[in-house]
Image: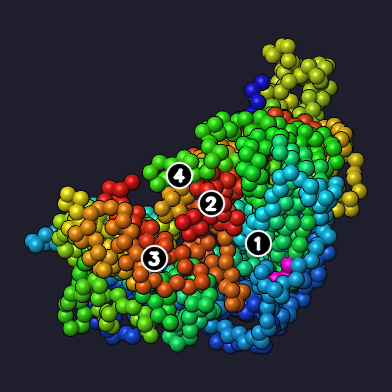
């Protein structure tokens, strides 16, 4: 039987997207829809003395102006786990007080018949502030670092093993360097947008979110209405990259405004300013790395101390040392995390939070250490290769990193690299090579799926999860098709609606690894039920045949060693007068670096009734650590005269278990590598040194890579199924690609130029 | 956006009359900069005069060999024009180094001359800016000024002129044809844009109602040996950190004549005549190019975040000179 899983199929929703027919959250036409435009504070700390809305209110078409004086009261959100809904700024529910905690904080919503009127009215509102002295930069002496005890999902951001200080002191070769990364903004193509309408006491919300279930939970919580009165819909997401993993004020402001004027209201954040102030960011990191090694390159001790920023209204920890714990076999290791509160909006996860900036600093440090040791950087990684999890000695569920190193090195032509920097020069152009290890945890959590196998010979499954552009619609359909024995065209996977059974939020690269096994279990059970129906049916050609002797292909059930004997799902179900077979499956397996998430502990494990889910759940996972690895190899060309860097080629080899769809998987790695080009060479948000207000406030000033920056990409996979994580065999693909890549580029730039820029981004001015 | 009325002008005189009558009026060509500024509440015209049907879309060769470019010729049409590509490659290269294909397809020659600065603070109505609100102060001088000018600045404004096209035109001694309420006149390119001085809100010498009708590029035999080099934070779709437009007349390795203009580092398209003079009579060599670059930037005034621009502009200029001089 030819498998559909594994094929590089085009996206199910590809045509919808390129023709503009895919309905994104901001595109739903609701009768009577009006528009909300939010106004943001222009001071960085203080409070509002007065908001003068009189001129704006008088404009024809203005329906209302909502401020802290007249907005409905909100309830404090109860949860803080993204899986059940995390409001990004727990101490700053919107429009509840006159206090200002950061520049760009929402202070009012103007609601009008048209977007244009709302915009114009917003420009006529006068705000009088009482300004106080703010702390808006991580380097500000007033910014006082402290050590947070809890990171994302309840994990500890501090870690210690062995006797680091002493071993470091006595090491034959030592390295100490500090690296900084700037603020990065996610900049999804689709801005945050919410459309809300009330029908009596029932609320419907179209929201662009990475966690539909979480938004439903939060809205119920914060607005104080029962959960079954809130429906959240989000069928397509134009990118999130973590910024839509937490929920932001817009998700509350739209239903508040809709209630305020009794009309459906849409609020979309403006690209300019708003997407840079009230929709999250990756924080600045200052990372100090210490490494100690013997002269053969065996690393005996390491220290990774990070300082990152958070706000005064919530705590977010960019735990840059998180990957350092697991990357190499380093017996003595300290991971230290400091946090500084600033008058800025709250940071939030950005594609591989912690791992992305952390692997930049650590993997550049490895490059520097290799140079000190006069060892090839790839060789240094092999010398310190971790066969088992260095944290607890557990086996990896599947680790084929050495194969990744081999594939990547061959693809880039690593043998052409000179150990001596700036040795490869043609005219004024310098060529350099760099590499780095990539790593990201293989997360999985709970998912429920409902699947209907119809008499017509098609199947539809539904789960309240998301497709954030990664290909969930497509890959889940591939799993369904194989498990049910139906053609790809005859299966449909539905998502993004809170009326569907609960699925995972799309964060931590877990959507596919979590939803996939539940889809598989549901599909297999539906097929099994059909087979059992046939076996028990005297009129069926399969009557009394052993279940194990029956196959299903192309919608037809048949005897495996006698293909002629069989019938279709349609024949079987019509004869039995069954319009459909309806099954549910829940898989509840929570992996988090061997820890249980807070959410998983809180929810008592329910015994699944689906035998295929049971088969998946009963596997012993305690003895494994679930983590993906990979490697990036980069070739750059630098104009030594002008300092302009051109990334010529990126060769990435990833070990992420079974590849369900090579095309969408490659797109994830390629897209993440493009993020890495941005991080390494051009992205970085800047705040005014005097006022703390965002300076790089749009896509003209905040530079993301464009087509002309694109190198040749060579993405390869080991494609080795990891049947320890699930019977699907696949680990997540969304984030690992951004880990290590920034370091690989920075290392290549160093190899080309001999200039070690330790403050990202590496713009031309830093290379001349 | 501030509300406005919209009219279409059928001929030059109607357009000019309408613009003269209304103090807060603006012509619209491609609108690629104006509409952005209107959305950001920086430009708030009461009246928009659409000039797109005026007969200003031709590129023609005059009897004296000069080339006359209609004000409504799009950046794309100009950049890909055969005469321009062959005789004035610097102009074609400069235009293609700017914006994106989509913008160039609609942006016009006249409009490009009037592009306004991309200073962060000019674009942020919540911050003081002398160019936007005269007398309110400059947020950039003591603020984040990485992209700002080192040449032609004043204590009121350090905003760069953003155009690439204008840098090439400055090097080529272009002549701007203007029609106003009192008839037609010609303005030398170097006179057209003004330095910020005490009045950064004034950016050129146009009078109320003046309509740019054409740009004339004088024939220049050695302009075929010309190039534009632009250094920026990414490979495309970005304003210059530094750029250089260069044309050299070289005979037996000796520079007979030179044209140099700089972009990205000055408050107006920056002609470097002293550097040109320094090259005349010199041999094509790394040394003479370096000397010229030093002269071009000798008056550079650096601030906290833009101090790199002096060196970067020199290197950019050397890169352009190398290209024409045949130095690898």
**Secondary element at tag 2:** loop
Q: CA distance from mark 2 to mark 3?
A: 25 Å
Q: Name the main secondary structure of what is drawn in magenta.
A: strand
Q: Is residue A411 above or below residue B292?
A: above
**Secondary element at tag 1:** loop
Quarter of the image where the N terminus of chain A is located: top right
Q: CA distance from mark 3 to mark 4?
A: 25 Å
Within 10 Å of disc 4 (Cα), the crowding (few <14, some 14-19, many 20+) is many
List the residue tagged with mark 4: A430
Same subunit: marks 3 and 1: no
| The residue stretch that appears in magenta | A340-344
Ranked by sequence position, the earlier of labels 1 and 4 is 1
List the residue tagged with mark 1: A284
Ranked by sequence position, the earlier of labels 4 and 2 is 4
State the image coordinates of residue A396 (x, y, percent, origin top left). 79, 35
Q: Is residue A373 left or right of residue B184?
A: right
Q: Residue placed at 80% from the left, 71% from the top?
A: A75
List the residue tagged with mark 2: A755
């Amino acid at each position: 039987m030819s498998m559909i899983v594994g094929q590089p199929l085009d996206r199910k929703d590809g045509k919808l997207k390129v023709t503009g027919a895919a309905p994104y959250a901001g595109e739903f036409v609701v009768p009577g829809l009006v528009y909300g435009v939010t106004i943001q504070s222009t001071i960085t700390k203080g409070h509002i003395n007065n908001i003068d809305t009189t001129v704006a209110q008088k404009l024809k078409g203005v329906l209302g102006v909502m401020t802290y004086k007249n907005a409905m009261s909100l309830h404090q959100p109860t949860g803080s786990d993204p899986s059940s809904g995390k409001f990004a700024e727990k101490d700053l529910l919107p429009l509840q007080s006159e206090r200002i905690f950061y520049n760009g904080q929402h202070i009012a919503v103007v609601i009008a018949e048209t977007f244009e009127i709302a915009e114009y009215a917003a420009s006529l509102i006068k705000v009088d502030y009482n300004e106080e002295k703010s702390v808006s930069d991580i380097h500000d002496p007033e910014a006082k670092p402290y050590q947070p005890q809890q990171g994302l999902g309840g994990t500890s951001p501090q870690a210690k093993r062995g006797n680091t200080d002493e071993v470091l002191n006595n090491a034959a070769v030592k390295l100490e360097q500090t690296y900084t990364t700037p603020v990065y903004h996610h900049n999804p193509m689709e801005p945050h947008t919410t459309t809300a309408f009330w029908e009596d006491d029932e609320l419907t919300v179209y929201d662009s979110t990475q966690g539909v279930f979480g938004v439903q939970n939060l809205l119920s919580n914060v607005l104080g209405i029962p959960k079954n009165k809130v429906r959240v819909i989000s069928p397509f997401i134009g990118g999130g990259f973590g910024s839509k993993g937490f929920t932001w004020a817009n998700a509350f402001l739209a239903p508040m405004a809709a209630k305020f004027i009794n009309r459906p209201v849409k609020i979309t954040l403006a690209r300019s300013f708003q997407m840079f102030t009230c929709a999250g960011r990756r924080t600045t990191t200052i990372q100090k790395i210490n490494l100690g090694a013997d002269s053969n390159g065996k690393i005996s001790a390491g220290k990774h101390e990070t300082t990152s920023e958070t706000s005064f209204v919530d705590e977010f920890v960019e735990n840059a040392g998180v990957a350092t714990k697991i990357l190499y076999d380093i017996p003595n290791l300290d991971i230290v995390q400091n946090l500084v509160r600033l008058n800025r909006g709250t940071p939030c996860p950005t594609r591989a939070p912690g791992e992305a900036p952390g692997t930049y600093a650590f993997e550049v440090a490895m490059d520097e250490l290799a140079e000190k040791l006069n060892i090839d950087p790839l060789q240094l990684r092999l010398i310190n290769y971790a066969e088992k999890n260095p944290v607890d000695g557990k086996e990896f569920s599947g680790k084929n990193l050495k194969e990744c190193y081999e594939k990547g090195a061959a693809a880039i032509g690593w043998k052409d690299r000179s150990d001596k920097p700036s040795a490869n020069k043609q005219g004024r152009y310098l060529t350099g090579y760099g590499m780095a290890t990539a790593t990201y945890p293989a997360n999985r959590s709970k998912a429920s799926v409902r699947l209907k196998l119809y008499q017509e010979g098609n199947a539809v499954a539904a789960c309240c999860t998301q497709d954030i552009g990664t290909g969930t619609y497509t890959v889940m359909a591939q799993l369904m098709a194989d498990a049910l024995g139906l053609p790809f065209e005859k299966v449909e996977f539905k998502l993004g609606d809170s009326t569907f059974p609960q699925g995972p939020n799309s964060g931590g690269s877990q959507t596919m690894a979590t939803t996939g096994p539940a889809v598989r279990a549901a599909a297999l059970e539906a097929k099994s039920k059909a087979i059992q129906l046939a076996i028990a049916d005297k009129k069926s050609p399969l009557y009394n045949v052993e279940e194990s002797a029956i196959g299903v292909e192309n919608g037809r059930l048949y005897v495996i060693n006698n293909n002629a004997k069989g019938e279709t799902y349609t024949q079987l179900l019509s004869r039995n007068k069954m319009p459909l077979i309806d099954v549910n499956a829940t898989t509840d397996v929570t992996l988090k670096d061997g820890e249980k998430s807070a959410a998983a502990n809180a929810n008592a494990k329910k015994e699944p009734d689906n035998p295929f889910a049971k088969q998946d759940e009963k596997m012993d996972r305690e003895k494994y650590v679930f983590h993906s690895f990979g490697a990036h190899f980069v070739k750059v060309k630098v104009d030594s005269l002008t300092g302009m860097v051109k990334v010529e080629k990126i060769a990435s080899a990833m070990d992420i278990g079974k590849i369900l769809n090579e095309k969408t998987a490659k797109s994830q790695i390629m897209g993440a590598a493009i993020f890495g080009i941005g991080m390494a060479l051009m992205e970085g948000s800047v705040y005014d040194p005097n006022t703390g207000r965002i300076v790089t406030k749009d896509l003209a000033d905040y530079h993301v890579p464009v087509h002309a920056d694109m190198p040749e990409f060579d993405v390869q996979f080991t494609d080795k199924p990891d049947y320890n994580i699930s019977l699907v065999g696949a680990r997540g693909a969304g984030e690992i690609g951004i880990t290590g890549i920034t370091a690989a580029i920075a290392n290549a730039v160093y190899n080309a130029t001999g200039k070690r820029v330790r403050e990202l981004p590496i713009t031309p001015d830093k290379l001349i | 956006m501030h509300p406005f009325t919209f009219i279409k002008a059928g001929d030059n005189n109607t357009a000019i009359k309408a613009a003269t009558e209304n103090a807060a009026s603006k012509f619209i060509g491609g609108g690629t900069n104006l509409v952005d500024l209107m959305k950001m509440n920086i430009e708030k015209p009461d009246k928009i005069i659409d000039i797109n049907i005026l007969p200003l879309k031709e590129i023609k060769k005059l009897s004296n060999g000069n080339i006359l470019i209609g004000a409504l010729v799009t950046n794309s049409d100009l950049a890909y024009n055969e005469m321009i590509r062959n005789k004035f490659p610097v102009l074609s290269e400069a235009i293609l180094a700017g914006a994106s294909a989509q913008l160039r397809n609609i942006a016009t020659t006249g409009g490009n001359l009037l592009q306004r600065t991309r200073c962060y603070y000019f674009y942020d109505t919540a911050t003081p800016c002398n160019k936007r609100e005269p007398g309110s102060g400059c947020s950039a001088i003591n603020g984040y000024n990485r992209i700002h000018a080192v040449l032609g600045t004043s204590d009121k404004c350090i905003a760069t002129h953003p155009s690439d096209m204008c840098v090439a035109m400055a090097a080529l001694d272009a002549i701007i044809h203007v029609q106003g309420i009192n008839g037609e006149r010609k303005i030398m390119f170097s006179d057209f844009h003004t330095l910020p001085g005490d009045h950064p809100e004034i950016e050129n010498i146009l009078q109320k109602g003046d309509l740019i009708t054409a740009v004339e590029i004088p024939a220049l035999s050695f302009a075929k040996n010309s190039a534009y080099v632009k250094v920026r934070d990414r490979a495309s779709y970005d304003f210059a950190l530094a750029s250089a437009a260069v044309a050299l007349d070289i005979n037996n390795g000796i520079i007979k004549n030179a044209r140099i203009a700089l972009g990205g580092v000055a408050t107006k398209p920056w002609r470097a005549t002293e550097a040109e003079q320094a090259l005349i009579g010199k041999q094509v060599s790394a040394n003479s190019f370096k000397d010229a670059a030093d002269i071009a930037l000798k008056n550079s005034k650096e601030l906290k975040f833009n101090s790199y621009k002096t060196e970067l502009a020199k290197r950019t200029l050397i890169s352009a000179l190398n290209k024409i001089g045949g130095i690898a």
